[in-house]
Structure formats: structure tokens, C-alpha cells
């Protein structure tokens, strides 16, 4: 659905007086911006039939095809026109718009520069052509467009024609695409200052506050847009959704009716019937209605139809069909239409169909990046962690803890520890070891990274604490564990960690390094923390007995010294 509208009166600054004599062109543009695409198409086709060389009408008919997701028709129209009007600036800009949507940025830039050159007059560049170039760059369908270039051209246009509200609106859209909400709102308000009757500016302002979840201002601006233009369909649609998802179905139904009354007669309005079937868990009914829309609307089917179809299939247990519908949604939808929860849903579908963890994690990273609200990012990750925990997916859970750690404004050491510990629980020891090394670097005064780093390396040393580089890492980790645990303030708190570290070090020095004196030393270090520990006392008694026969000092059977079960807490202390 297009998120744009424009009042008829503001179009006057965009076209010559002769072209506006019948007011048909602004009428068509107003229909286009108010979601009445078929009405807009009919107006522009009528104008072209009356005057096949009406380049303004041709440009806007191409824009209507783009709004209808029929980029091929727009390309054919602009190409046909350029065969007889090769230097028509507005058509060149429109053709560049098509190039941007198709990801042909270099070709688009060449057409834009040619359009600027062709339109340059004694007073400089034509602001209307610059505006068309800026509109193309700001279009959310043009996903790879150089938005900085578009903003630059729109700024020049605004300087050349400061009373053209359409330029300011497009500049607001460009800033919004650049994720500069403040810049967007500023230019929407400037547009309203130039033309207070501009419903689109009020509506677009509302959509900025939608992304910020500022519902009070969002609703206020939507209602202001309707006050400006009572037939402004996009605002009714937003109000429908706002009430629908809050289960205020009577209010939602009222806004749906007003949307339909303000729109063209269209089979796609059956979407509201499908939505009601879905909310009532009549998934089969929803699927039948939505497929009926697709069969009649064909390539012009709005992306939202495919999204609801994907949810309906998923809720009906047909995950494969849900994926197919969702893939079509992402292929058709603009960046503006796709929300973070859509990407989370995509990740869930891919996971259900057996996608590897790396694929799902990349999607969740994309969802986090797409959300502009910090709290939403954190909530999304915490919810995803709980889902992974419920499924017993340790790798996914650990990776999400890492993502959460990196996403927080104030990094939280428990997230990093939980990532390492969860990798350890899942038997992913190299990943755990890497995380604990990072933990030690970032929190060198904490015992947890050293202790669990040592435990992780004992799990990787399949040669019974004899293989490098594990032995060295184990020794260094547990020495640091004993050092921190031995501090007066820590002895009571970290007894279990100290005892286990002491036993491992004793085993390595006695059995692997054949150094009984050092083995006894580390038993004593453990006893400094827990003087009455029966296990440590028993091991010291064995090590202190004289060696019989010719056995070298310290050459005790490994069975004499065994690490006791870990009784330490599995979560790090908060900072």
C-alpha cells in the first residue's frame, strides 16, 4: 500500500497554467497519492488519448504503473516515449526511476544527469526535474538507490522553488528513507507551512511516529490528515490496522468501510474479509479468499495479500506454502512496507523448514537492524532467546546472547557469559572458548571467564589433561581462578570454583608434569579458600606420603586424583 497522498491545490506549482486548465492532471495525481490507482490510471490515459504528446501525463501514468507494481509497463511506456522524445527531461527522470527499481544505479544516474542537462535553463536546473529525480531516489521500491544523491537534488530544488510543497514532501520522504526521522518531520512540517491543506504531509508525519511506537501522536496525525481530506484512504487503512490488532473490531470495521468508500472498487478490498476470517481462526476461509484475490488481481496483487496468506498457511500447518507466499511478499513489498516482525516471521518459517542456524541468525540480525526503536530490538532478541531455549537449540541461543550483548547500549557481562556457557552446554567448545577469552579481556577482574574457560578446555583435552595447547590454557585459567577466589572478600563466595581449579591443577602437575611439589602447592592454594574440604585434605594426604620403590616423585596414578563434580553457579554475577 502506498503511504502517500497530496492535495489537489499544491500541484499547481508543479505544472504550467495551460496544462492545469482542466484540472485533470492534478486530479489524477491526487487519486494516485490517495490509493485510487485505477482512477489515476484512467485520468492519465484519457489525457494521453486527447494529446499523445502530453509528457506530464505520460510521466504520471508511468508513476501509476510503478505504484501498481507493474514496472515492466512503466519501462515500456517511457521507452516508447523516448523513441520520439529522446531528450524529454521528465521522461528521462521517469525512466531512471525504473532503472533504480531494477537495481541499475549507474544507468539511472546517467539518465538523471542527462535529464538535468536537457532541462537546464538560464536560471539553472529545472526544480521540477530535480524533484522527479529526488522522488525516484526516495521511492522505497528503489532499494539500492543512492539516497544521498536524491537528497542533494531535492535540496537544490527546494532552494530554487521554496514554495513548492511537493519538493518538501519528497525531501521528507528521502530523509525518512535515510532513517533520519527528525529531518523527515522537519520537511513535512515545512510542506504544511507552505500548504496547510496537504494531507500527505500530515499522514507521512504520522508514519514517522508509527515507527517510534508513539501511538498518541500517530493517531492524532492520522485524524488530522482525514480532517484535511475526508477521502484520504491511507489514513483509514492505518486506523483500521491499529484497532484490528488491539482487538477493537467494531472500530476496525468502521475504518475498513471508510477505506473502501474512499478507494476504487477493487477485488483486493476482499482483503478485509480474509483478515476477519484469519482473526476468527478460519484459516481455510482466509486462504480461499486471498487466493481468489490473487487469481483476479494477478500481478497487481498488493503485497499485504501475500503476507496474510503466508500467516494463514502457517497457522493452518502448511509451512511450505507459507514460505512460498512469504517469498512473494518480500519480492513485491517495498522496504517501507516490510517491518521487523515480518523478518522474524521469515526466520521462524525458515527454521521450521530446517534452515541452518546461520541462515536464521542472519535473518534475525536483519530484523534487529530494521527496527529503529532500541527497546524493540532488545525485546525481539530476548523473545528469540526464549524460543531457542524452548526448542533446546543451544547454538541458536548462544548466538542470540552474543547478538544481545552487542546490541545493548550498555553491554551487560551476563549476556556474554551466557553465550559462552550455552555454547559449552551444547558441546560447542571452540565457540565457548572464544567467548570466554573475550569475556576475560572485557572483564579481567571477574572469575567466571577464567573458570569456565578452564572447564571448556578440559572438555576439549581428550587426552586426559595432557594435550597442548589445552594444558597451558587450563593451567593459566585455573591459576587466575585461584588468584581471584583467594582474595579475602571472595573466599566464601567462590569456594566451589577454587576447589575444582585446585584439583585440576594438582592433577596436571602431578600426573602430566610429574611435579609433586607444585601439585601440593596448588592443593594448599585450594585449602586457603576452603580449609576443611575433605576432598582436598584427602588428596594432600596421598601426595604427602613417601614414594615407595623407584617411582619418581610425583608419578602417582591418575586415578588417585580426580576432579570433583562442578557445584558452581552457571551464571555470571551482574556488573
Image (cartoon, rainbow, N blue to C red):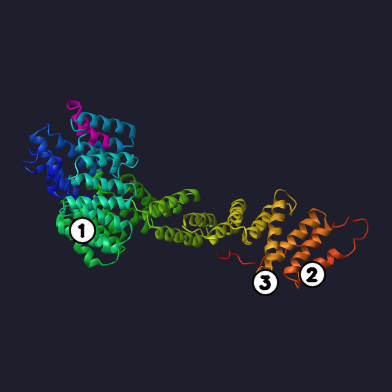
Q: Position of residue 320 (x, y in %)?
A: 39, 50
Q: Determine the residue located farthest toward the right in the rendered image.
A: 549
Disc 2: which residue: 537
- Figure check: 16 above or below 194: above
Q: Main secondary structure of the magenta part?
A: helix
Give the mark, 3 or 2, whose residue is nearer the N terminus.
3
Q: Position of residue 435 (x, y in %)?
A: 58, 54
Which residue occupies the foreground of this view, 471 or 350? Answer: 471
Q: Determine the residue located farthest toward the bottom in the rendered image.
A: 532
Disc 3: which residue: 492
**Badge 2, how many Cα within 10 Å: few under 14, some, many 20+?**
some
Instruction: Measure how far apart labels 1 and 3 are at the Cα level.
Output: 64 Å
Left or right: where does residue 71 sit relative to residue 61?
A: right
Label 1 residue SS: helix
Label 2 residue SS: helix
Magenta residues, start to end? 73-97
Label 3 residue SS: loop
Disc 1: which residue: 236
Amino acid at each position: 500500500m502506498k503511504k502517500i497522498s497530496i492535495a489537489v491545490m499544491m500541484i499547481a506549482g508543479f505544472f504550467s497554467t495551460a496544462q492545469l486548465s482542466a484540472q485533470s492532471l492534478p486530479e489524477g495525481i491526487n487519486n494516485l497519492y490517495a490509493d485510487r490507482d485505477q482512477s489515476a490510471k484512467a485520468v492519465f490515459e484519457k489525457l494521453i488519448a486527447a494529446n499523445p504528446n502530453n509528457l506530464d501525463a505520460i510521466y504520471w501514468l508511468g508513476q501509476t504503473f510503478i505504484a501498481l507494481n507493474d514496472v515492466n509497463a512503466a519501462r515500456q511506456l517511457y521507452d516508447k516515449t523516448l523513441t520520439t522524445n529522446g531528450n524529454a527531461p521528465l521522461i528521462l527522470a521517469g525512466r531512471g526511476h525504473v532503472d533504480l527499481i531494477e537495481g541499475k544505479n549507474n544507468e539511472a544516474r546517467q539518465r538523471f544527469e542527462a535529464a538535468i542537462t536537457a532541462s537546464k535553463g538560464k536560471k539553472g536546473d529545472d526544480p521540477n526535474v530535480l524533484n522527479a529525480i529526488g522522488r525516484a531516489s526516495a521511492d522505497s521500491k528503489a532499494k539500492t538507490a543512492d539516497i544521498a544523491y536524491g537528497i542533494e537534488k531535492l535540496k537544490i530544488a527546494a532552494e530554487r522553488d521554496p514554495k513548492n510543497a511537493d519538493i518538501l514532501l519528497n525531501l521528507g520522504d528521502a530523509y525518512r528513507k535515510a532513517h533520519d526521522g527528525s529531518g523527515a518531520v522537519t520537511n513535512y512540517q515545512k510542506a504544511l507551512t507552505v500548504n496547510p491543506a496537504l494531507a500527505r504531509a500530515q499522514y507521512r508525519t504520522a508514519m514517522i511516529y508509527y515507527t517510534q511506537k508513539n501511538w498518541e501522536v500517530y493517531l492524532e496525525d492520522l485524524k488530522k490528515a482525514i480532517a484535511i481530506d475526508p477521502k484520504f484512504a491511507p489514513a483509514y487503512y492505518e486506523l483500521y490496522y491499529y484497532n484490528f490488532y488491539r482487538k477493537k473490531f467494531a472500530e476496525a470495521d468502521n475504518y475498513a468501510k471508510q477505506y473502501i468508500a474512499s478507494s476504487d472498487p477493487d477485488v483486493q478490498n476482499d482483503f478485509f474479509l480474509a483478515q476477519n476470517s484469519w482473526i476468527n481462526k478460519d484459516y481455510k476461509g482466509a486462504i480461499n479468499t486471498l487466493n481468489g484475490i490473487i487469481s483476479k488481481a494477478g500481478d497487481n496483487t498488493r503485497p499485504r495479500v501475500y503476507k496474510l496468506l503466508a500467516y494463514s498457511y502457517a497457522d493452518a500447518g502448511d509451512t511450505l506454502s507459507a514460505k512460498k507466499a512469504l517469498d512473494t511478499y518480500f519480492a513485491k513489498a517495498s522496504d517501507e512496507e516490510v517491518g521487523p516482525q515480518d523478518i522474524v516471521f521469515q526466520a521462524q518459517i525458515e527454521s521450521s523448514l530446517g534452515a541452518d542456524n546461520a541462515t536464521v541468525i542472519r535473518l534475525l540480525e536483519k530484523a534487529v537492524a530494521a527496527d529503529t526503536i532500541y527497546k524493540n530490538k532488545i525485546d525481539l532478541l530476548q523473545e528469540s532467546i526464549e524460543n531457542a531455549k524452548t526448542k533446546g537449540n543451544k547454538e541458536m541461543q548462544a548466538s542470540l546472547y552474543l547478538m544481545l550483548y552487542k546490541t545493548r547500549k550498555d553491554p551487560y557481562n551476563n549476556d556474554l557469559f551466557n553465550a559462552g556457557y550455552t555454547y559449552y552446554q551444547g558441546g560447542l567448545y571452540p565457540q565457548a572458548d572464544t567467548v570466554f577469552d573475550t569475556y576475560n579481556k572485557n572483564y579481567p577482574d571477574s572469575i567466571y571467564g577464567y573458570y569456565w574457560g578452564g572447564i571448556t578446555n578440559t572438555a576439549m583435552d581428550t587426552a586426559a589433561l595432557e594435550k597442548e595447547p589445552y594444558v597451558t590454557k587450563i593451567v593459566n585459567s585455573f591459576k587466575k581462578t585461584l588468584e581471584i577466589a583467594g582474595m579475602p572478600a571472595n573466599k566464601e563466595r567462590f569456594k566451589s570454583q577454587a576447589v575444582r581449579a585446585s584439583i585440576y591443577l594438582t592433577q596436571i602437575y602431578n600426573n602430566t608434569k610429574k611435579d609433586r611439589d607444585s601439585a601440593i602447592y596448588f592443593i594448599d592454594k585450594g585449602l586457603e579458600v576452603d580449609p576443611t574440604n575433605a576432598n582436598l585434605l584427602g588428596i594432600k594426604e596421598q601426595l604427602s606420603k613417601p614414594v615407595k620403590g623407584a617411582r619418581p616423585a610425583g608419578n602417582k596414578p591418575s586415578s588417585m586424583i580426580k576432579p570433583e563434580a562442578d557445584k558452581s553457579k552457571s551464571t555470571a554475577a551482574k556488573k
